[in-house]
Image (cartoon, rainbow, N blue to C red):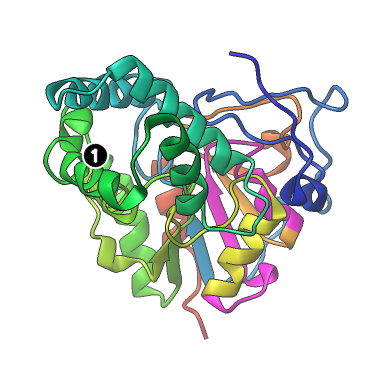
């Protein structure tokens, strides 16, 4: 797949290339070789009030490539069962996802997706969305049928809640809320444990842009210095450091690109080790 490097508001704000959503490496045309600079000693202790969690490959122990392959096959079958051209539908879906990746912030990711999808497939978003909602409510769980939750994810969430930390799920906002909540349940977690989750309905940018993380900080009502971002992708999740967040990389399903942060220079460990890290944190004052 050829990846694009569009010039848009988000790219200007972050100085990064736009993410191509179906490539889990998302290395793009990196401006220079080598890892991005870590602006401060990310191994140093920090005090937090809020923890942002990535979902796929972090809270949810799943390989992103395997997930996307299963998802595209599943939704393709669903389209075919409803008399739709699965190939054309898949291409329109991909084009819509690319539009979200290139969103200039003037619309929600939802609107950016449906504008392009409907241009290719005809009809309106109001006509298409009920069909997709039927898929996410009744068929999407088949994609996660073989996923085994990691008990350490629940242990980490429990330890943080007991200590008074505010929790949010800052996953790539290219799915509707119902699909994000489904994946949280696959991870053995309760969506109600989180103050908010980023979705295509409530976001106008994507990872790793500063605009995405600034939007999440605004929703949480905190500054970056108060936040620990927990993720598995050194570029997408590492983007949180550009707005002042600290970072902890979960290494069970680690994804590294040359233009992402140097994981060895940041807090990192398995999810089990992260759970112990949480248990050692002080209560929020």
Q: In screen coordinates, is 56 left or right of 78?
A: right
Q: In this view, does 37 lie above or below 1?
A: below
Vertical order, 36 against 69 (above or below): below
- When the figure is inspected, residue 23 is found, relative to residue 277, above or below; the finding is above
**Which residue is depicted at the point 77% across and 39% down?**
16
Dividing the picture into quadrants, the one containing residue 73 is top left
Pick the front one: 147 or 89: 89
Depth check: give the residue in front, 162 or 134: 134
Residue at image x 32%, y 23%? 72
- Residue 143: name its quadrant: top left
**Whole-percent x, y for residue 8 in the image:** 76, 45
* Residue under label 1: 149
Which residues fall within the magenta stretch? 220-242
The quadrant the N terminus occupies is top right
Horizontal and vertical percent position of residue 120: 44, 30
Q: In this view, does 83 lie to the left or right of 42?
A: left
Residue 181 in magenta stretch: no
Q: What element carries label 1?
A: loop
Write the residue at 88% across / 25% down: 32
Up-down relation of residue 106 to residue 152 (above or below): below
Q: In this view, does 4 lie to the left or right of 255?
A: right
Q: Which residue lies furthest to the front in this view?
A: 123
**At x 79% / y 39%, what residue is drawn?**
7
Residue 187 visible in the shown view:
no
| Residue 29, horizontal then vertical, whole percent | 77, 22
- Left or right of residue 167, residue 131 in this image: left
Number of numbered labels in the structure image = 1
Judge the density around disc 1: few (<14), some (14-19), many (≥20) Cα neighbours within 10 Å: some
Residue 192 seen in render: yes
Residue sitting at the far right: 32
Counting from the top left corner in percent of width and height, residue 95 is at 51, 30
Membership of 236 in magenta stretch: yes
């Amino acid at each position: 797949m050829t990846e694009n490097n569009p010039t848009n508001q988000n790219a200007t704000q972050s100085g990064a290339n736009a993410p191509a959503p179906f490539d889990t490496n998302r290395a793009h045309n990196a401006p220079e070789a080598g890892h991005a600079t870590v602006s401060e000693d990310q191994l140093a202790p920090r005090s937090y009030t809020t923890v942002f969690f990535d979902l796929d490959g972090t809270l949810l122990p799943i390989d992103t490539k395997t997930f996307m392959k299963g998802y595209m096959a599943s939704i393709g079958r669903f389209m075919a069962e409803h008399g739709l051209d699965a190939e054309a539908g898949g291409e329109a879906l991909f084009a819509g996802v690319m539009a979200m990746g290139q969103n200039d912030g003037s619309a929600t990711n939802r609107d950016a997706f449906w504008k392009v999808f409907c241009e290719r497939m005809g009809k309106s978003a109001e006509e298409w969305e009920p069909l997709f909602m039927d898929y996410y409510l009744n068929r999407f769980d088949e994609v996660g049928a073989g996923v085994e939750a990691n008990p350490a994810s629940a242990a980490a969430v429990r330890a943080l809640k007991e200590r008074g930390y505010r929790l949010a799920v800052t996953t790539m906002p290219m799915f509707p809320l119902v699909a994000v909540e489904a994946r949280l349940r696959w991870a053995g977690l309760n969506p109600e444990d989180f103050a908010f989750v980023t979705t295509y309905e409530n976001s106008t940018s994507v990872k790793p842009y500063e605009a995405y993380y600034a939007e999440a900080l605004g929703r949480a009502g905190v500054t970056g210095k108060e936040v620990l971002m927990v993720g598995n992708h050194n570029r997408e999740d590492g983007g949180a450091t550009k707005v002042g967040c600290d970072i902890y990389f979960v290494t069970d399903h680690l994804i590294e690109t040359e233009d992402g942060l140097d994981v060895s220079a940041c807090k990192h460990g398995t999810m089990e080790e992260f759970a112990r890290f949480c248990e050692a944190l002080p209560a929020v004052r």
